[in-house]
Amino acid sequence: MGLFKFIRRFKDMAITGSFSRWYDKNTRENRIGEMREYAKEAAKYLTEQANVLEVAPGPGYLAIELAKLGNYNITGMDLSADFVEICKINAKRENVNVTFIEGNVSAMPFEENSFDFIICSAAFKNFKEPVKALQEMYRVLKKGGIVLIIDMRGDATKKEIRQEAINLSKSGFERMFMIRIFKSLCKYAYTKTEMEEMIKQTPFIKNEIKESSISFYAYLYK
Ligand SMILES: C[S@@+](CC[C@H](N)C(=O)[O-])C[C@H]1O[C@@H](n2cnc3c(N)ncnc32)[C@H](O)[C@@H]1O
């Protein structure tokens, strides 16, 4: 068993301190395109004034990009107080209105049936209690609402990881760095089958999991 998988048994993997500042800078410099893609995917399912929750937004760029696409009521909730502060600064700089608060996906500080849409990117594998996280998402989602979870696939092959790193990197050094990161993330990421097993333990009425390059997109319907 990998180190992160072992740690996750006992604790949620919040990102804090200098690592949160590095993560913010790296996302701003290298992952805004990815955040825009996810925001566009979310916007397909939204109508004006929709209540949207981003679970574990990290530095908040997905929620911020989504706020630029329409008139939505967006909340971002992360376990890391450091990230919540970074999110507020980033939203102010981009001049968008998003509410960022601190909270744990295992016990969210929201009433049931609060949101039309919930999105969670690159974070599901960090949760100590993934089934509890799904049950909480179900609880705070409105009837007819959708949860979209995007994360790395635990069964991405070395070849797929290498190809993804080639597609994303600008230099040979960056490519090697990315391959290392993806390989370590892959060790504790979930496969489609593992996701399906967890979803079975929740009341979602329907789900669809699409696999793409080294990621999966899981759509859950209430
Ligand atoms: C790898 S980052 C992903 C951030 C962002 N969504 C992205 O796509 O870059 C994982 C995030 O999950 C948050 N996190 C971990 N456990 C959590 C929990 N139980 N509840 C809420 N957030 C959590 C971390 O603090 C961190 O911001």
Image (cartoon, rainbow, N blue to C red):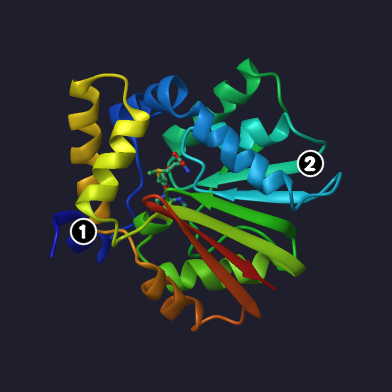
Which quadrant holds the N terminus? bottom left
- C-alpha separation, residue under disc 2 versus residue under disc 1: 36 Å
Q: Is residue 90 above or below residue 99?
A: above
Say which amino acid is labelled 2: Tyr
Q: Is residue 43 above or below residue 211?
A: above
Say which amino acid is labelled 1: Ile
Q: Residue at x 64, y 71 (%)?
A: 139
Asked if disc 2 and disc 1 are in contact, CB closer than 8 Å, the reply is: no
Residue 60 in sight in this render: no
Question: Of marks 2 and 1, which one's residue comes earlier in the chain?
Answer: 1
Q: Residue at x 36, y 30 (%)?
A: 168
Category of crowding for the residue at label 1, using alpha-carbon neighbours closer than 10 angstroms: few (below 14), some (14–19), many (at least 20): few
Q: List x then y, in percent, for residue 214.
A: 36, 51
Q: List x then y, in percent, for residue 204.
A: 62, 77
In the picture of the structure, the residue carrying the numbered disc 2 is: 72
Q: Quadrant of residue 5?
A: bottom left
Q: Residue at x 56, y 21 (%)?
A: 89
Residue 7 numbered tag: 1
Residue 101 numbered tag: none
Q: Quadrant of residue 62?
A: top right
Q: Secondary structure at mark 1?
A: helix
Category of crowding for the residue at label 2, using alpha-carbon neighbours closer than 10 angstroms: few (below 14), some (14–19), many (at least 20): some
Q: Secondary structure at mark 2?
A: loop
